[in-house]
Image (cartoon, rainbow, N blue to C red):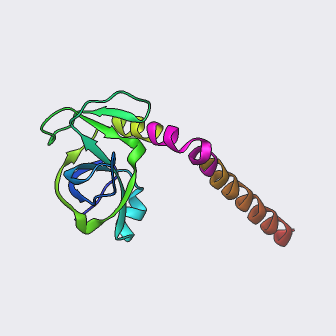
Amino acid sequence: MDFIRGSIYYAELPDAGENVQRGWRPVIIVSNNVSNRYSNLVNIVPLTSNLKEGVTHVTITAPGLREVSTALCEQVMTVNKNTLSDKLGEIKTSDLLKIHKAITMQLGDMALWYGLYTGLFYVLWFYYLWKVVTLING
């Protein structure tokens, strides 16, 4: 089974205490596709049919969902792929971008800084390689 970012599945979520989504419910995969392909784990955002407002909540309508739902982006979880079953469909790219923004709001600038740090690392690495090749070739 292919697990693609933005796909909606049913999952059996563990009981993690009060105010945390649990039980059999739809979820959206939010982890990157490379990790989804090679890892036994995926990051998900649970959905609820309780429509809620908030900066970490995104309203979702998608084929396969029985009703309009709210993605609870403050509850990003890591689950084993074997807890997922019954692919329901995929969300629109615009909704995936809203979810990404909501997760970034939840995690604060940490997510943004990690992305900038990673990008800067690659820029400096390629600059270093270019300098080495330039020195070798004279």
Q: Residue at the left extreme?
A: 66
Residue 58 lies in what quarter of the image?
A: top left
* Residue found at x 31% / y 55%: 4
Query: Image height check: is 15 above or below 63?
Result: below
Q: Position of residue 25 (x, y in %)?
A: 20, 50
Q: Nearer the viewer, residue 132 or 25?
A: 25
The stretch in magenta equals 102-114
* Residue found at x 78% / y 68%: 133
**In-image side of 64 versus 35 (left or right):** left
**In-image side of 63 versus 136 (left or right):** left
Q: Position of residue 63 (x, y in %)?
A: 16, 39
* Residue found at x 29% / y 59%: 3
* Magenta region, main secondary structure: helix
In the rendered image, the quadrant that contains the C terminus is: bottom right
Query: Image height check: is 35 above or below 106?
Result: below
Q: Residue at the front extreme?
A: 18
* Residue found at x 33% / y 57%: 16
Count of picture labels: 0
Q: Nearer the viewer, residue 79 or 86?
A: 79
**In-image side of 78 versus 23 (left or right):** right
Q: Tell me, yes or no, whether the highlighted magenta stretch contains residue 104.
A: yes
Q: Position of residue 125 (x, y in %)?
A: 72, 62
In the rendered image, the quadrant that contains the N terminus is: bottom left
Residue 48 lies in what quarter of the image?
A: top left
Query: Image height check: is 94 above or below 6?
Result: above
Q: Tell me, yes or no, whether the highlighted magenta stretch contains residue 124.
A: no
